[in-house]
Amino acid sequence: MNWREAIHFMLHADFAVKRLRFDDHIVDHGDASSDDAAEAFDQDFAVMIVQLGRMLDELIEACGGPEKI
């Protein structure tokens, strides 16, 4: 599956999300002026977590809400 051209994944019958992959335009949002690799990683990770949360919220609703899953 593909969520908003940002996250690619496989959704199994038991609602397990596998093979999660972020598109390059999501991962490379770190501050280009940052020379610190750890800081750039932290920025990218924060963006990925926000996007993943949004995707999971929409996925749960598309599947009938938490009570159906």
Image (spheres, rainbow, N blue to C red):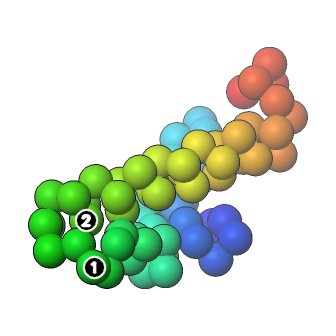
Q: Residue at position x 15%, y 58% from top?
A: 38
- Please state which amino acid type lies under the numbered disc 2: Ala
Location of residue 27 by image quarter: bottom left
**Label number found at residue 33:** 1
Q: Can residue 52 be seen in this view?
A: yes
Q: How crowded is mark 2: few (under 14 residues within 10 Å), some or many (20 or more)?
A: some
Estimate the x, y position of residue 50 in percent, counting from the top left. Answer: 54, 49
Question: In the rendered structure, which disc, 1 or 2, sits on the residue that comes first in sequence?
Answer: 1
Q: What element carries label 1?
A: loop
**Cα distance between the residues tagged 1 and 2:** 9 Å
Which quadrant of the view contains residue 28? bottom left
Depth order, front residue of 62/28: 28
Residue drawn at point x = 49 percent, y = 80 percent: 25
Q: Is 34 drawn above or below residue 11 in the view shown?
A: below
Label 2 SS: helix
Numbered disc in front, either 1 or 2? 1
Residue toward you, 16 or 34? 34
**Residue matched to label 2:** 40
The quarter of the image holding the C terminus is top right
Horizontal placement of 25 versus 38: left or right? right
